[in-house]
Amino acid sequence: MKAVKLKKVRIRVKRNRPDPGSSPGLFRIGEQSPATQIRAVTYSPAFCSETEITVQNQVDRLVAGLSAEAGSRVWIDICGFRDEPLVRSVLSAFSIHLLAVSDLFNSPQRPKCDDYGSFLLIIAHTVSEKPDSQSRPEMTQVGILVTGQAVITIRETAREVFDPVLVRLQSGKGLIRSAGPGYLAYAILDSLVDRYFPLTDQYMDLLLALETEAIVRSTHQQLQSVHALKAELIELRRFILPLKDVVSTLIRNDHRWFPPEIKLYLRDTHDHMLEISDLMEMLRDLSVSVMDLTTSSISNKMNDRMKVLTIITTVFTPLTFLAGLYGMNFSPMAQPSPDNPMNMPELFLPWGYPAVLSVMLLLAAGMLSVFWWRGWFGRGR
């Protein structure tokens, strides 16, 4: 008996893990890791400027400029891990602890919030939309570091994920320039959370389409598609539910970067997380319902086929009996005689053959009529 290979369905997550027993702060650079791109956005209530950091000297000048101007702040966005020395120089300039470095680069980490005293570490995940119904969404870990005058975001891919926040920062509308680094961290976290809504809409559309197909015509391929979607939803919950706890922790605990006026906005993000969690639970229940419906539809279709075959067999059983009965005891003589008194008299009638066929047809039609009247096929009564 051939062994069946089970293909695990998982959301694509970038995995970077050091060797067991490695020192804190070590991380492994993947071979497919994109080139490092570091964007520094210096801003204050009066101005906003963006620069690309390519050498370590730029990091030193940036930190010196923050020390000289008390009102200025900076957002450093790091995408890609290939240039490890440059990335480490940015983190060293802001005195990021080695344990935090391990959490930032060794992914995937469980979403969490750690207070190191001089800075706050937030681990979250962002997700992309499905390119098509057969593709899987790609999950990317995002680390957010909040310090006195800086916010540092770091991830391996998905450079465009923070473009809406950058547009808000450049336009200067609202509180994003004047409310401190905590508000910028809230805006970044809120943008990550809002990216789940289009994905849940995609899953809803896919499941409703599969549900309609299950009612009209179910196949084993549709059952596999529903199973794949269900596995993806279960995988998504592993990252969504802890992220809800992270936002709740930021609201409950007293962090100097998140004063009460910013926690009001975090409550809105928490409401979004609750809504997404409810949507995920509903989608998971819907996937189970669609899977049961598809399985039942396939079983009903098989039962209908078996019913047709059973009716055909039932109709042909008496016909087979009659055909077998009149296929026996043929007389070798053209006329009946006393030598073969047990021979069938119908065999010598001129209309015997048409008469038997007529009886068989009437018997088949009568049985089919009774089956239809009882509702075994067609509409019936």
Image (cartoon, rainbow, N blue to C red):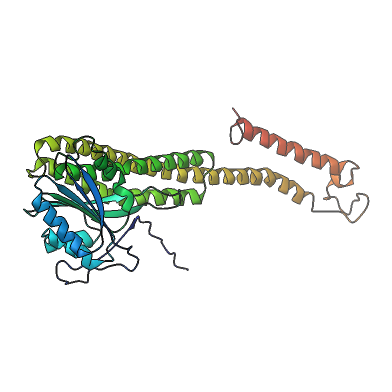
Residue 245 visible from this viewpoint = no
Q: Position of residue 318 (x, y in %)?
A: 70, 44
328 with respect to 79 (left or right): right
Q: Position of residue 50 (x, y in %)?
A: 25, 50
Q: Considering the image in quadrants, where does the C terminus appear?
A: top right
222 with respect to 102 (left or right): right
**Residue 99 falls in which quadrant of the image?**
bottom left
248 with respect to 293 (left or right): left
Q: Position of residue 92 (x, y in %)?
A: 13, 62
Q: Residue furthest right?
A: 334
Q: Position of residue 219 (x, y in %)?
A: 52, 48
Residue at 12 percent across and 35 percent down: it is 261
Residue 31 visible from this viewpoint = yes
Residue at 44 percent across and 39 percent down: it is 208
How many numbered marks, from 0 up?
A: 0
Depicted 381 relative to depicted 190: above or below: above
Residue at 91 percent across and 42 percent down: it is 350
